[in-house]
Amino acid sequence: MRRFVGELQQATTRDDLQRHVGWLRDQLGIDHLVYHSVSGAGQQYGILTYSDDWVRRYVDEGYARIDPVVQGSLRRFEPIDWKELDWSGRQSRNFLGEAISAGVGNQGYSVPIRGPGGQFALFTISGRVSDASWGRFVTSTTTEVLLAAHFLNQKAQEIVQGAAQGDAQPLSGREIDVLTLLALGMNRAQAADALQISEHTLRSYIESARIKLGAMNTTHAVARAVAGGLVLL
């Protein structure tokens, strides 16, 4: 993750992002990794490892209208394991069968991301493994996947806009401590215990750091702190 984040910060073109996405896919040992963003004005931007044939088929058939992953993500803020979605409809079953035949995989995990100005992005990993294997994989890599999703979205938006985000306000030492523990995978209770503070106080530090970093949520704040070198893993 340190290598991915470090090299991602040097990216200046879409080709750079494509190369880094391919590398991360290989390191995770999955079949595909996809990032797709739509701005509030409808401008689309994608970095993905699907085959060109499947992408053309998906676009030509307008599958986004019936894809349970897309439709489910539009109504949620938290990550989605594809097994949690409703695939019982005939259209959904046929679509899933076609996607699997195209090499997408029978398992997937998608992270919805919402940015300023109505921007919406979806970061997805997928593969072809058993339910048990996929469950273990998601449990062990959730933190890394969430951070990668927000790092990639931030860098992609910088490239699209042609300029990086403005400098964030400096964080206090305790705010950095809190974000560091969260970046290492601790939950709020564990982080509060490690710092010997109450969860209420911990939440105050998180909210203060989030505002200073201009982040949408805690995960985004952690991602920005790491990307900016404020938190070192």
Image (spheres, grey):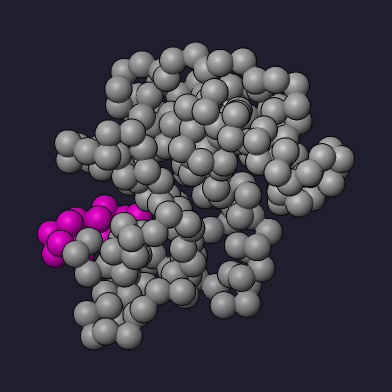
Q: Is residue 61 magenta?
A: yes
Residue 19 in the image: state x and y as whole percent: 45, 36
Quarter of the image for residue 118 reads top left
- Which SS type dominates the magenta stretch? helix
Position of 142 relative to 128 (above/below):
above
- In the image: residue 154, left or right of residue 210: left
Residue at 65% of width from left, 20% of height from top?
171
Quarter of the image for residue 15 reads top left
Residue 126 in the image: state x and y as whole percent: 47, 62
Q: Is residue 155 magenta?
A: no
Residue at 17% of width from left, 40% of height from top?
42
Residue at 44% of width from left, 69% of height from top?
82
Q: Report the magenta residues as a range.
A: 48-63
Considering every residue shown, the one lying at the far left of the view is 60
Between 49 and 161, the residue placed more toward the observer is 161
Q: Is residue 3 visible?
A: no
- In the image: residue 28, left or right of residue 44: right
Position of 138 relative to 206 (above/below):
below
Position of 181 relative to 185 (above/below):
above
Q: State which quarter of the image contains the C terminus.
A: top right
Residue 134 in the image: state x and y as whole percent: 58, 69
Q: Is residue 119 visible?
A: yes
Q: How many marks?
A: 0
Q: State which quarter of the image contains the N terminus.
A: top right
Between 40 and 122, the residue placed more toward the observer is 40
Between 175 and 82, the residue placed more toward the observer is 175
Residue at 36% of width from left, 37% of height from top?
115
Residue 186 in the image: state x and y as whole percent: 74, 48
